[in-house]
Image (spheres, rainbow, N blue to C red):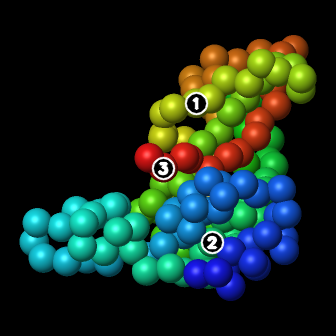
Amino acid sequence: MAGVCSLLLSIRPDLTPDQIRNILCLGAEDQIGDATDTPGFDNYYGWGRLNAYNSLLLAKTRFDQVTALPNNQVKLGWISPFNASNKLPYQISFSTNLAGPWILLTATNGFSYTSNRTYWIDDGTLTGIKSNSAACFYRIQLKTLP
């Protein structure tokens, strides 16, 4: 685990210990126990088996694709770990001013996943912004686990 922490800090030296813990847990592969086991944290397997690759992808999360769609919709995309559809590690914030305030969208709808990419579409219903005259800025962040 120390080696993965070192790798995370090599690409993101600004990470705090809590952020590193969060990334390691979100990138872990959930281990399935008996019939009473549920996805996510459990007393038998914790957050799961450490996956360095997933954790590094999460640490490097950045929008790399922005597509304007009809009806003022915006589609954002980024590289993500294979287990993103199970872990749902992302949150989107938006603002009409780059300086803020930023509004965190708590709804998980709008996300779609492929094997190595995550997409999010703002159709205006989540942010409430549909007008061409209103600029909208987005940022992505990882969820914070308890």
Amino acid type of the residue that numbered disc 3 sits on in the rendered structure:
Leu
What number is the disc on residue 18?
A: none
Question: Camera-side residue: 92 or 28?
Answer: 28
Amino acid type of the residue that numbered disc 2 sits on in the rendered structure:
Ser
Residue tagged 2: 55
Question: Crowdedness of circle 1 by 10 Å Cα count: few (<14), some, many (20+)?
Answer: few
Q: Secondary structure at mark 1?
A: strand
Amino acid type of the residue that numbered disc 1 sits on in the rendered structure:
Leu
Which quadrant, please, contains the N terminus?
bottom right
47 relative to 72 in the view: left or right: left
User: How many marks on residues?
Assistant: 3
Q: Position of residue 95 (x, y in %)?
A: 77, 23
Pick whichever of labels 3 and 2 is earlier in the sequence. Answer: 2
Does residue 21 sit above or below 110 in this rendering?
A: below
Does residue 71 sit above or below 96 in this rendering?
A: below
Quadrant of res 86? bottom left
Q: Secondary structure at mark 2?
A: helix
Pick whichever of labels 1 and 3 is earlier in the sequence. Answer: 1
**Residue found at the very far bottom of the displayed protein:** 3
Q: Secondary structure at mark 3?
A: loop
Q: Position of residue 12 (x, y in %)?
A: 82, 64
Mark 3 → mark 2, Cα distance in angstroms: 14 Å
What number is the disc on residue 145?
A: 3
Residue 83 appears in view: yes
What number is the disc on residue 105?
A: 1
